[in-house]
Amino acid sequence: MAYKVFISSIRDDIELAKDLSRRLEDVGVSVFPVEKTVIPAEKILTTVNRNLRKADEVMMLLTKDSGASPGLVSELGMAYSMGKPITPIVVNLDPENLPPVYEDMRYIRYADLSDYIAKLAARASLRKAG
């Protein structure tokens, strides 16, 4: 069974989310679709909830515009309540500028993402073998 990642981001960061998704898929990690289409809000919430339940890990893209986004904070709360591992990916933010909800979380800088993806790929390979 493939290791599954849910990427949480805002619309303005869609290109970053697509890049992250491509990089994860290149190493064999399954990623839920990152593009949100124009559909009713209740359907989006249902889809996000279902995909979060199926995910093995949740990655949150944190930029200067997204950190306090109500949608991101909501997805963080859902993932946390489901006991999902949450990995904030920090893009061009200094630690002192992180919103309080993320301050105590272990995060990965976007510039250091290659190392994290390599470790994730190893975990994904073990999962496929097991």
Image (cartoon, rainbow, N blue to C red):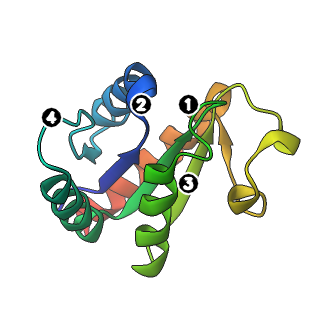
* Label at residue 64: none
Amino acid, disc 4: Val
Residue at x 22%, y 37% (from the top left corner): 36
Q: Circle 3 — which element? A: strand
Give how far across and how far down residue 79 sits, in percent.
42, 69
Residue indicated by mark 3? 87
Q: Estimate how packed mark 1 is, as few (under 14), some (14 to 19) or many (20 or more) residues with alpha carbons within 10 Å.
A: few
Residue at x 60%, y 36% (from the top left corner): 115
* Label at residue 20: 2
Residue indicated by mark 1? 114
Sequence-first tag of 4 and 1 = 4
Residue at x 64%, y 29% (from the top left corner): 91
Q: Are marks 4 and 1 in contact (CB under 8 Å)?
A: no
Q: Are marks 2 and 4 in contact (CB under 8 Å)?
A: no
Residue at x 25%, y 66% (from the top left corner): 49
Sequence-first tag of 4 and 3 = 4
Q: Examine the rendered structure and indicate whether residue 104 appears above or below residue 110.
A: below
List the single residue furthest toward the top: 15
Amino acid, disc 3: Thr
Amino acid, disc 1: Ser
Residue indicated by mark 4? 38
Specify the quadrant of the image occupied by residue 20.
top left
